[in-house]
Amino acid sequence: MAQQNNYEWNLPATPHRRFIDWGLIAAGFVSSFWICWLSMGSSRRSLIWSVVLCFYFLFYRRITQVIYWSYNTFRFLQHQSPTGQRSDESNTSPQTFPIFHILIASYQAGQSIGPVLRALANQNYPADRYHTWVITEHSEQLKKENQVNTLVRRTLEAASDPTHAQAFSPFFWRCISNKSMPIETWVKEITSGKLRSLLNAPNISVVVLEDLLFRLTCIPDKATFSSSRILDLLQLTNAEIAAIDGVLQRISNGVDSIVADFTRILGSENIYNRSDLVTQLIAHEVRKRKLRKIGRRLCQRFYLSSIPLEIPGREAIEREARLALASTQAVTQQLIAELPKANIRHLDPYKRGPKPGALNAAYRIIKKEGFLDDSRQVYFIIIDSDSLLPANALRVVAREVSQRRDVPEILQMVSIPTANFFSGNWYSKFVSFADAIGAVGKWARSTRRQLKPDLHAGSGVVVPASLAQFVDVKTGWPWDETTLTEDARLIIGQFGMMNEVKNKTRAAPIYLLEAVPEDDSFLRTYTSFWNQRRRWTLGGYDEFFYILHSPPWLRHSRYSHSSATWEAHLQTSAKEQITSRMRQFHRLILWVWDHFVWGIGGLIALTHWWLISVLVGSPGRAIGWLGLLAVLLAPLVFLLVPGRQLYWFIPGGLSVRRMCFLYILSFGGIWLYCLPVVATQLVCVLGLRARIVEWRPTQKPRYQVGTPLDIREI
């Protein structure tokens, strides 16, 4: 069975397969010209449309490849159980296991880092053979402290001024209505107590509704408790009680389904707190108009203007402010205390820079503490602060690196961005699905067929320590801090150019779940998505010039098995130099074609059919209907072929209703999806790259009900 799986996973690009590929391309080109000549005759218009059809043939050929390889990859991964057997240390020597250093560069990730570290603590791997390094930025903690102090000061100032206190009433509510208050007491405070004075504040109805639903959902003993009894005390109508009971049932069923899915996918039950999942589903429910009306009527029913505004004490204000503005540092330290056997180290450098600087800071400490004195069996695993590893991830990677080829390779796990599909807004869901199908399919084809070094995501990358040491000796650091993204530079620009430009990345047959940008509103979500894609595109743009000017010591490096190190061999023959230059040129062509197809080429595919029709005339009814059919069927095929396999990796599932929603959304959402990449590419082509080089963090998903006060601008 193992041999069969290896065969399914690795399908090298043999000469026979390459011949078939080129034969299909030639047949497509001939068919495009023949159709145009047959329907339009020999004319200038038919020649132009022949070229247009050739472009669409190439474009849809790549789409077909993406569909097949994403489908095949998901199908294979479904058979990989995340609950592998734990090592029997009495029979197996720990020295046979590779040592992994898991590097997590974290910034403003206090609301997403928790599940990541819990997943790492549950790895089925010898605890002394892997180390987790969380690298934060000290300025974040300083900024959070300043924000907390500012929020406390402004809140206390508003409390002494009734004209400004109304704006802070939702925050006052959070301070007074803490989660430890019993629900009976909470209802009494609303109907006849101190919370009654806050029911007239702006947006307070949403906060009250979230609070009510959370308390009803988290009641310890539901068998002896009736939500209708509490709702009767709030004087709700039978229709309102039925609506809330329906919401509670959907939330309960949804949480059960999501917990079961995460347990199945990750192989561990305690990755997420159940209350965190509940709050996310509540936030979705209260966006509905019907529930918002219930909340407004509830507030209007019990508000009494004669009651003076209730102001919380300073201690309660500080407690809520620190909860709402929890820094990555505070959350990491708390988890280290909760997970003492997880071997987590926290580094908090100041002015470390973007992600490459964080990784270099961890590398220097690891080197200083002697972990790299013998690097033969040492590997770095780079994941993001929203990436969830299944319990058997390190075991699978250990098996793969033990079967390495002539040189230690860079491996990548299959990064599937569905971790927050259940909680994301409509655009986050679209990005999650599009990235999971498109990026995985494109990357899987390249790495599983061993075509070239390719990059899927910066998370889940396995880097041999010997490679990082070699780059460090030559450049002064293993990860280049002059670029916004270290991922492409290390994988394509450095590793890909080594060994006479022969190195290729390899896929590890294991997945990890990632999140996509998510925020309270579409505008904030899209801004975060734009910043993410701009950063990736700029990093890829840098790679073109780095590949073009890669130094000789890099191109002619070789791996020495005797010393287990990389070495530069500058004394090479003319034949070797010519061969490496030809491979370098081939990599450049592939780079340009890939960036064109998945950027400007994608936007052209959406627009220039109509543009050509206006300029030179319609291609004819038959070709026009064929083009329309291709446009309508492409997203449907994505949904029905790889989408059905992707369903297995989506916590909360992918219902028929959601699939129909994604299909309808694809016709407009794809424009927004392509726009940041195309805009960045055009800016770079125009020579204006320096004007947009600025690192901005991607908004991580939040696992709590939205803060009732916009404190991010404080």
Image: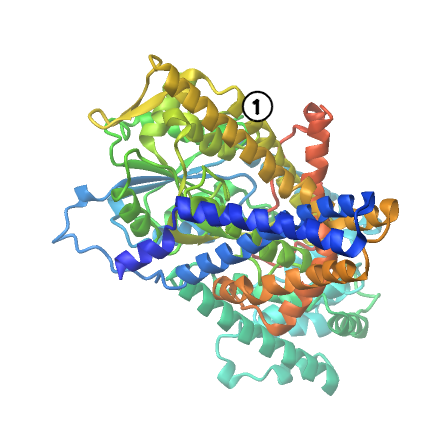
Relative height, residue 90 to residue 75 (above, below): above
Residue 292 location (% of width, % of height): 76, 69
- Pinpoint residue 108: horizontal percent, then vertical percent: 57, 41
Query: Closer to the camera, 217 or 119?
Result: 119
The picture quadrant where one finds residue 406 is top left
Q: Can the viewer see residue 614 in this picture?
A: yes
Q: In this view, does 405 lie to the left or right of 652?
A: left
Residue in view at x 72 percent, y 44 percent? 51
Instruction: Name the amino acid type tagged 1.
Output: Phe
Residue drawn at (24%, 49%) of the image:
126
- Res. 625 image quadrant: bottom right
Determine the image quadrant of residue 103: top left
In which quadrant of the rendered image does the N terminus lie? bottom left
Q: Which of 497 and 333 is in front in this view?
A: 497
| Count of marks, rendered view | 1
- Which residue is under mark 1? 545
| Crowding at mark 1 (Cα within 10 Å: few <14, some 14-19, many 20+) | few
Q: Nearer the viewer, residue 348 or 97?
A: 97
**Residue 271 against residue 213 in the figure, above or below:** above
Q: Which residue lies furthest to the top in this view?
A: 571
Q: How is the image coloured?
A: rainbow
